[in-house]
Image (cartoon, rainbow, N blue to C red):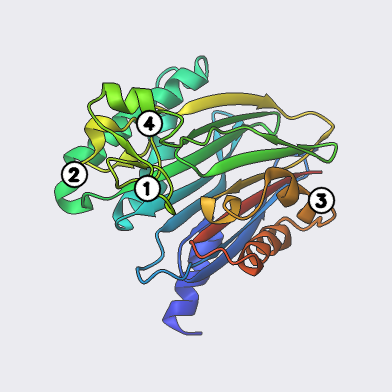
């Protein structure tokens, strides 16, 4: 086995990845809860290196099992999403009120993490990253937070329900303008903050931060008997598929890793050119 193959296996076992093509799977260790997950990443057709990073792992904390899932979609470099992969969940769990005021703790951790990224722009660079994060608490409660346009969707009785918020510049124009920025709407292009960034909220982006927010939208979803699975994916998927189309494509696919791979393949068949990262969590 080559050194590269050994590194790939270590990354899959650890529950995260980012390369030209990366995949992995895992399952909950809780007795009586058969919860599985799988992830798959595919590099887009851009000239730069892969800028997506994924977290998909379980951690035991104070006799509780936490499923930690995230998509970090970088822009203008991979240092910021790589930093988030390594530090964001630790920062969230270190918040003193995580167990009592979970949503507030997540917002505080997002803000503190963004401040560190800006302070370290000298070595992390001036790029940024969107994020969608999910914490599954004891297999029963899913807390989703996001900034940017990566998305979280669950399937209940075959029906797609979006949990995250797409932070598009056109939707937050007034907020951006109050901060002193502007939103461009050039024909043939998507709306952009100051003519540059296609999302209104992100980590990093020091040169635009005065006009951007890093405050996440946070929502809590109780996992009930009719909750079949969740999809977390970067915009490389959602640019070419609706929420319901994604749910329909994998509803009969019981293997979570295969389901994640099928979604990336479907996005590619629909001519998606962006990096595509996808996690599927199945609640059996």
- Tag 1 or tag 3, which sits nearer the N-term? 1
Q: CA distance from mark 1 to mark 2?
A: 33 Å
Look at the image and tell me in which quarter the C terminus lies. top right
Q: Which residue is mark 1?
A: 186
- Tag 2 or tag 4, which sits nearer the N-term? 4
Q: Which residue is mark 2?
A: 120
Horizontal and vertical percent position of residue 144: 56, 32
Residue farthest toward the top in the current orientation of the protein:
100
Residue under the point 81% across and 55% down = 254
Asked which quadrant contains residue 111, the reply is: top left
Q: Is residue 20 left or right of residue 129?
A: right
Secondary structure of the residue carrying tag 1 is loop
Q: Which residue is mark 3?
A: 251
Secondary structure of the residue carrying tag 4 is helix
Residue under the point 27% across and 50% down = 127
Q: Is residue 49 left or right of residue 230?
A: left
Horizontal and vertical percent position of residue 235: 53, 50
Secondary structure of the residue carrying tag 3 is loop
Q: CA distance from mark 4 to mark 2?
A: 15 Å
Q: Residues within 10 Å of mark 2 (few under 14, many from 20)?
A: some
CB under 8 Å between discs 4 and 2: no
Q: Which mark is residue 110?
A: 4
């Amino acid at each position: 086995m080559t050194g590269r193959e050994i590194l790939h296996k270590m990354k899959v076992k650890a529950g995260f990845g980012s390369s030209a093509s990366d995949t992995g799977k895992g399952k909950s260790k809780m007795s009586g809860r058969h919860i599985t997950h799988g992830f798959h990443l595919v590099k887009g057709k851009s000239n730069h290196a892969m800028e997506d990073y994924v977290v998909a792992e379980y951690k035991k904390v104070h006799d509780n099992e936490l499923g930690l899932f995230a998509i970090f979609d970088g822009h203008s470099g991979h240092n910021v999403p790589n930093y988030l992969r390594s530090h964001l969940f630790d920062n969230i769990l270190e918040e003193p009120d995580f167990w009592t005021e979970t949503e507030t703790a997540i917002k505080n951790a997002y803000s503190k993490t963004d401040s560190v990224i800006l302070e370290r722009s000298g070595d992390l660079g001036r790029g940024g990253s969107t994020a969608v994060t999910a914490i599954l608490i004891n297999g029963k409660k899913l807390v989703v937070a996001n900034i940017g346009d990566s998305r979280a969707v669950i399937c209940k009785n075959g029906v797609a329900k979006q949990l995250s918020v797409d932070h598009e510049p056109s939707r937050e124009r007034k907020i951006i303008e109050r901060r002193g920025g502007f939103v461009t709407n050039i024909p043939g292009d998507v709306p952009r903050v100051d003519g540059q960034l296609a999302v209104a909220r992100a980590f990093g982006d020091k040169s635009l931060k005065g006009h951007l927010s890093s405050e996440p939208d946070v929502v809590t979803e109780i996992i009930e008997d009719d909750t079949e699975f969740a999809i977390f994916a970067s915009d490389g998927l959602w640019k070419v598929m609706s929420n319901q189309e994604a749910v329909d494509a994998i509803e009969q696919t019981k293997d979570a890793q295969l389901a994640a791979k099928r979604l990336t393949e479907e996005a590619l068949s629909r001519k998606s050119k962006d990096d595509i990262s996808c996690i599927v969590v199945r609640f059996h």
